[in-house]
């Protein structure tokens, strides 16, 4: 099995260019099948989640052409058959085929999705939305058949502003008859990106990016060209790395306003940065002090970035805390960081952790337990003294485009072995 080997402690300088957002592209690709003409999506990151979605499209007989940074999808000959358990389980975002196939054919047959095990991650809100649009759900041992004679718009209140449920309901409602209103909708930038894509194809979606989204069903969606927004979590990861090791390190092709919570927290800890229109430069690391972080839905502090912050907090003087309010099991990286010399404690209910710093980190053998947890270990390895090897790196590669190449180009000693 491949591992990532990092010789830590090297300063980083130059420019890191941010790729397209994983959590956007993994919804855009399933969304594309709603259209019967060819759609082109650009700024597509080269990550294994995209490979897994491509396999589902091929299984469904859609035509997908990939070239660097671009995919073209034509779904005019798609066959609406069962998405096998193996394909469904490959990634979380396979669940967007629920909304997309339901929206296109009024029927979908697939299994419970996969993804990182960072909590229970039920899909009850997605299903509730489909039911309110008129679908009947048959569920047996993780196998779902969701079908409707006709989908009709409805008012749908989400008990929690779930990203996945908001997007899935938009996909199912876009061709439904009449008007759908999603209340307490998620407001993440990825939602706006998906809504813009659908609108470019002729959908009528208003209010994406606010807590109320209105969708007027349309009969036909036409060809379009669409660009994936920059990945705010990738940008945030490199911003944290720059705070620890950057010497004139520029994070480029990003949208700083998508990272306001992270920027505020790094600044509170003592990080100094120059924020441009589409980039951030860190001139040099400073002395940092402990801070408290609480994850919240957008625009609050992103849960996907709290694990990345953990190695940063080991380098802050004093006591820091991380409170995780979105997922039940997102501190699996901390025992691995402790192996490298961190001083962390996780509260019994698994919802809050304390990190005491500043502790020097030492290279050793660690294991990625999930995507962002893996990235957290990678950040730690970059600042640690000596060599770290990270096992289970498939988690990292499903979400970070060319991570080894990007870090090597700015001076990191990192390789896949
Ligand atoms: N939830 C429910 N019922 C549902 C849906 C969600 O209880 O029907 C709960 C979840 O269990 C969780 C919370 O609501 O506790 C948030 O879930 P949400 O649906 O918002 O998340 P998601 O769609 O499963 C996406 C990203 C995650 C990211 C979250 C939050 C994708 C493929 N995944 O997940 O990304 O953490 O939104 O921003 O877009 C990652 O990139 O590492 C990652 C995990």
Image (cartoon, grey):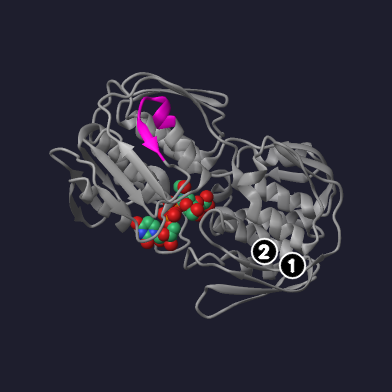
Q: Residue furthest left?
A: 149
Kindly identify the residue that appears in the image at 23 percent across and 37 percent down.
178
In the image shown, does 209 or 417 lie closer to the viewer? 209
Q: Quadrant of the C terminus?
A: top right
Please tell me how many numbered marks the rendered image carries: 2
Q: Are marks 1 and 2 in contact (CB under 8 Å)?
A: yes
Kindly identify the residue that appears in the image at 62 percent across and 35 percent down.
19
The part of the image, by quadrant, that contains residue 252 is: top right
Magenta stretch bounds: 197-206
Kindly identify the residue that appears in the image at 74 percent across and 45 percent down.
414
Crowd rating for badge 2 (residues with CA inside 10 Å; few <14, some 14–19, many 20+): many
Relative to 9, 225 lies left or right: left
Relative to 288, 313 lies left or right: left
For label 2, the residue is 310
In the image shown, does 43 or 380 lie closer to the viewer? 43
Q: Position of residue 23 (x, y in %)?
A: 50, 43
For label 1, the residue is 314
């Amino acid at each position: 099995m491949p591992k990532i080997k990092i010789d830590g402690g090297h300063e980083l300088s130059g420019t890191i260019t941010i790729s397209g957002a994983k959590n956007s592209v993994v919804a855009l690709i399933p969304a594309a099948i709603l259209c019967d003409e060819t759609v082109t999506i650009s700024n597509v990151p080269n990550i294994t989640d995209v490979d897994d979605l491509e396999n589902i499209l091929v299984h469904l007989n859609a035509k997908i052409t990939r070239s660097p940074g671009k995919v073209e999808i034509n779904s005019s000959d798609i066959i609406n058959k069962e998405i096998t358990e193996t394909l469904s389980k490959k990634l979380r975002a396979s669940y967007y085929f629920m909304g997309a196939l339901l929206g296109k054919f009024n029927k979908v047959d697939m299994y419970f999705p996969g993804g990182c095990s960072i909590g229970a991650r039920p899909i009850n809100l997605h299903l509730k939305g489909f039911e309110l649009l008129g679908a009947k759900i048959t569920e047996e041992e993780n196998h779902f058949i969701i079908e409707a004679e006709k989908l009709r718009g409805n008012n749908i209140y989400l008990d929690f502003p779930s990203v996945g449920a908001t997007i899935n309901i938009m996909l199912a409602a876009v061709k439904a008859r009449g008007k759908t209103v999603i209340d307490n909708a998620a407001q993440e930038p990825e939602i706006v990106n998906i809504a813009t894509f659908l609108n470019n194809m002729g959908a009528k979606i208003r209010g994406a990016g606010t807590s109320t989204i209105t969708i007027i069903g349309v009969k036909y969606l036409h060809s379009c060209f669409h660009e994936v927004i920059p990945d705010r979590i990738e940008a945030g990861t490199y911003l944290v790395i720059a705070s620890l090791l950057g010497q004139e390190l520029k994070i480029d092709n990003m949208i700083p306003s998508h990272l306001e919570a992270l920027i505020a927290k790094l600044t509170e800890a003592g990080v100094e940065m120059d924020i441009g229109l589409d980039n951030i430069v860190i001139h040099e690391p400073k002395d940092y002090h402990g801070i408290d972080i609480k994850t919240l839905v957008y625009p609050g502090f992103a849960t996907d970035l709290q694990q990345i912050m953990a190695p940063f907090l080991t380098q802050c003087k004093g006591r820091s805390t991380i409170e995780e309010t979105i997922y039940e099991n997102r501190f699996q990286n901390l025992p691995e960081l402790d192996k490298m010399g961190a001083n962390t404690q996780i509260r019994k209910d698994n919802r809050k952790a304390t990190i005491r710093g500043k502790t020097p980190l030492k290279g050793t053998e660690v294991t990625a337990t999930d995507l962002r947890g893996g990235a957290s270990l990678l950040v730690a390895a970059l600042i640690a003294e000596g060599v770290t090897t990270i096992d289970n790196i498939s988690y990292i590669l499903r979400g970070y485009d060319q991570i080894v190449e990007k870090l090597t180009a700015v001076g990191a000693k990192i390789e896949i072995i």
